[in-house]
């Protein structure tokens, strides 16, 4: 487990201290679950057999809830698919489904009213767990809803006349079901349905105010994630079964990046399953991170993270954190930004302010594939220098210096991409300083997780969006907090870092043009 706290006033680091948070705070816990899987998920199980399987995982949840409670946790988050697993068919998942009523329409405490609905044994047990250990509990379940859908009777029913949803449920410390969220952005989950309309779901707590709900792949899309943030929700709950994709979308890398770029707390709980490269959970705020990421070859085991974090709900906190204490995205709107925060480009991007006046080398560039997309790269051929690399009209600027004592046996490159992601319809603008897989330039963009070279750098660009998420990933899956991250409403972004504690793997500005996404 790693922890750090970012102190903007001195641009420094210190170890995370559980009780070091000043002002209103609460204790959060997330659990990375070494899941017990169904060995043959394509074969339908009876309800009794499916329950026996889920109870094995619930037994583990029970032990973790007890541990979290002993450490003072007030809210505990379990991962996506943590009870039943994945890779089902629409028919074979049926035994795992439970009808989850809408808490916005009715009040129900499964622990104290266990007979109100049939086939709700898992919900009953989760409710009693929350009640027994006196904490808010978030879990992910497989929900069954009838046709027509009670919340949207006009929605066209699936062909088998039932709705099956990947679902977050939230229980209060009394066991009351207080929130239900159906995942909007499914990732190769054809046994689940997308809800007819995106759901923007929040719930309130007595210790930290309001939280918003999302699941896994949702983190990459406007709905519900950014929609929640733009409604003022600054505390997000994120169960996930995230398959890591270096060099730009490792779990902790993007979790941290989103927390910083959106200026929110993110409570992220992942599965641990090496066959699908699943690991990486954390408790992230704009000021600190407590996280876990297993290294390749380590034994598969679970991990409970507990940390005290500041309350960020602006309606709950009477006195806001001052600007000097925040790492924040400037939410102001300029004349070149429309109501959604996208910038109207009249000309090519101006050189960013941090590096204005510097002389940039537009050295030989080449195309290499990174994350399935054709990036334009330029190599860092010297121990220090300035680079400008463009992909179309989108340009990234880099000032860099490698301390003289560092080895030159590793190759680095600045990669730039502006366009539609090849697989998932994501509209992207990305600046990425990466360590290449070898000394061949065309190894740039390959998966790398180790590095010996510590670089000082300033990475800048003018994006066509304000939605830019920064990350600095160091050797052996260590997150480094940028020394400085600045962003304006019209997309001028600067990422500055120096005095690295470990070798640089990737430094990235990951821009999302949500308004250009394809279905």
Image (cartoon, rainbow, N blue to C red):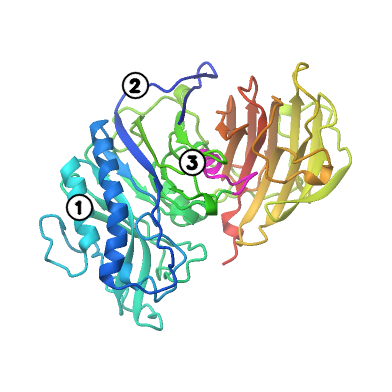
In the rendered image, which residue does mark 2 sit on? Answer: 22
Q: Is residue 250 magenta?
A: yes
Location of residue 356 in the rendering, given as x and y in whole percent from the top left corner: 75, 28
- The CA span between labels 1 and 3 is 32 Å
* Residues in magenta, as a range: 245-258
Q: Which residue is mark 1?
A: 127
Distance, label 2 to label 1, CA atoms, is 32 Å
Q: Secondary structure at mark 1?
A: helix
| Residue at left offset 63%, top offset 45% | 246
Label 3: which secondary element: loop
**Is residue 238 among the parts visible in the rendering?**
yes
SS for callout 2: loop
Above or below for 146 versus 225: below
Q: Earlier in the sequence, mark 1 or mark 3?
A: 1
Query: What residue did someone put label 3 on?
Result: 299
Left or right: where does residue 269 sit relative to residue 117? right
Return the residue nearer the eye: 144 or 350.
144
Residue at 21% x, 64% y is 120
Q: Nearest to the eye among marks 2 and 1: give it.
A: 1
């Amino acid at each position: 487990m790693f922890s750090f706290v970012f102190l903007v006033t001195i641009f420094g680091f210190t170890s995370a201290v559980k009780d070091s948070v000043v002002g209103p705070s609460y204790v959060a816990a997330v659990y990375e679950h070494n899941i017990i899987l169904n060995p043959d998920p394509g074969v339908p199980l009876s309800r009794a057999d499916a329950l026996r399987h889920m109870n094995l995982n619930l037994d583990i949840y029970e032990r973790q809830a007890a541990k979290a409670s002993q450490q003072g946790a007030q809210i505990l988050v379990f991962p996506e698919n943590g009870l039943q697993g994945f890779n089902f068919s629409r028919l074979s998942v049926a035994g795992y489904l439970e009808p989850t009523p809408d808490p916005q329409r009715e009040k129900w405490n499964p622990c104290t009213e266990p007979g109100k609905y049939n086939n709700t044994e898992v919900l009953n047990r989760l409710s009693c767990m929350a009640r027994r250990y006196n904490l808010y509990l978030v879990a992910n379940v497989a929900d069954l809803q009838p046709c027509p859908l009670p919340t949207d009777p006009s929605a066209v029913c699936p062909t088998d006349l039932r709705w099956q949803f990947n679902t977050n449920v939230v229980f209060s410390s009394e066991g009351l079901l207080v929130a239900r969220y159906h995942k909007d952005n499914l990732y190769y989950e054809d046994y689940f349905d997308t809800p007819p309309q995106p759901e923007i779901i929040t719930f309130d707590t007595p210790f930290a105010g309001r939280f918003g709900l999302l699941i896994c792949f949702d983190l990459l899309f406007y709905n519900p994630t950014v929609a929640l943030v733009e409604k003022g929700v600054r505390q997000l709950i994120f169960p996930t079964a995230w398959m890591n994709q270096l060099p730009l979308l490792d779990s902790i890398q993007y979790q941290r990046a989103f927390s910083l770029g959106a200026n929110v707390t993110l409570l992220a709980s992942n599965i641990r399953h090496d066959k699908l490269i699943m690991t990486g959970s954390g408790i992230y705020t704009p000021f600190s991170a407590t996280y876990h990421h297993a290294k390749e070859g380590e034994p598969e085991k679970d991990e409970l993270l507990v940390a005290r974090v500041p309350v960020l709900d602006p309606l709950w906190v009477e006195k806001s954190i001052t600007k000097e204490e925040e790492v924040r995205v400037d939410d102001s709107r300029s004349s070149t930004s429309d109501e959604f925060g996208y910038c109207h480009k009249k000309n090519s991007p101006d050189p960013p302010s941090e590096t204005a006046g510097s002389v940039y080398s537009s050295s030989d560039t080449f195309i290499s594939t990174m994350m399935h997309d054709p990036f334009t790269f330029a190599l860092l051929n010297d121990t220090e220098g300035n680079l400008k690399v463009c992909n179309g009209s989108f340009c990234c600027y880099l000032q860099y210096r490698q301390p003289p004592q560092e080895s030159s046996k590793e190759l680095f490159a600045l990669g730039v991409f502006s366009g539609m992601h090849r697989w998932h319809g994501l509209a992207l603008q990305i600046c990425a300083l990466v360590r290449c897989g070898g000394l061949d330039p065309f190894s740039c963009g390959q998966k790398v997780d180790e590095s010996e070279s510590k670089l000082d750098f300033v990475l800048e660009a003018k994006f066509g969006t304000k939605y830019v998420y920064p990350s600095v990933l160091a050797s052996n899956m260590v997150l480094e907090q940028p020394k400085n991250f600045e962003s304006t409403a019209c997309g001028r972004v600067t990422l500055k870092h120096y005095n690295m504690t470990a070798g640089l793997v990737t430094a990235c500005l990951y821009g999302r043009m949500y308004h250009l996404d394809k279905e």
